[in-house]
Amino acid sequence: RQRQDAPAAAISAARSWFLKPHVFTQTIAGLTIPRRWGTAAGDGHMAETTSIQKVMLTGATGFVGRSVVRELLAKGLRPVCLVRSAEKLRAQHRDVDPERFTPIVGRLSDRGALREAAEISQAAIHLAGIILARPLRGQTFAAIHTRGTANVVDSVERAGIRRYVPMSALGTRPDARS
């Protein structure tokens, strides 16, 4: 039951964030304050200057990501998907014209691929994550959930993207250590 609700929850979160302006915040000395980049007239609120046509998406070939890709396509948006395998993304959506989405091959540690995806997008959804660590493959919680997310946020900020939706299952269990 929970697995079936995960894509719907991600899509609902994405809809609510895309439909209203948001101010990114940062915590300094225990205080949460608006970031000063992307502001209009120095008022601390993000300026709304472009319509969203392309959405950067990490985790596009995962359980939730596949559904988010379909929802974005259904809304007439173009997913810009950071993927390890473009072939896997195309196979998952073989009934869709491949011109309707853009695969960018890379990993969360690949700042060049992240920059490429972010620079052609007006919004971003970060879904990539792991449930099981595989250190021999470089898949650790620190590498994916911490450094990977930091790389995504950095790329999004540098590209001036003002709409960012993260989703993670890390630490959602009552007995989780995170």
Image (spheres, grey):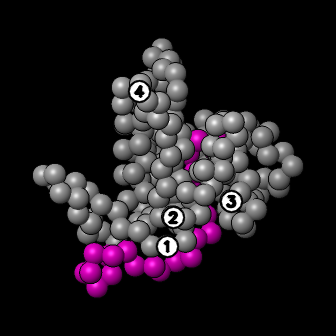
Q: What residue did someone put label 4 on?
A: 176
Label 4 sits on what residue type? Answer: Ala
Residue 72 picture location, percent across and down: 68, 59
Q: What residue did someone put label 3 on?
A: 72
Query: In the depicted view, which residue is nearer to us: 141 or 152?
Result: 141
Q: What residue did someone put label 1 on?
A: 20
> Earlier along the polypeptide chain: callout 3 or callout 4?
3
Asked whether disc 2 touches disc 3, contact meaning CB atoms under 8 Å apart, the reply is no
Asked whether disc 2 touches disc 1, contact meaning CB atoms under 8 Å apart, the reply is yes
Q: What residue did someone put label 2 on?
A: 17
Residue found farthest to the right: 95
> Earlier along the polypeptide chain: callout 1 or callout 4?
1
Residue found farthest to the top: 136
Q: How crowded is mark 3: few (under 14 residues within 10 Å), some or many (20 or more)?
A: some
Residue 34 picture location, percent across and down: 27, 66
Q: Which residue is drawn at 57% across and 59% down?
A: 14
Residue 28 picture location, percent across and down: 17, 54
Q: Does 113 sit above or below residue 19?
A: above
Q: Does 142 sit above or below residue 120?
A: above
Q: Which residue is drawn at 70% across and 48% down?
A: 67
* Circle 2 or circle 4, nearest the eye: 4
In three-dimensional space, the C-alpha distance between marks 1 and 3, rounded to whole angstroms, equals: 17 Å
In three-dimensional space, the C-alpha distance between marks 2 and 4, rounded to whole angstroms, equals: 27 Å
Q: For mark 4, give the secondary structure.
A: loop
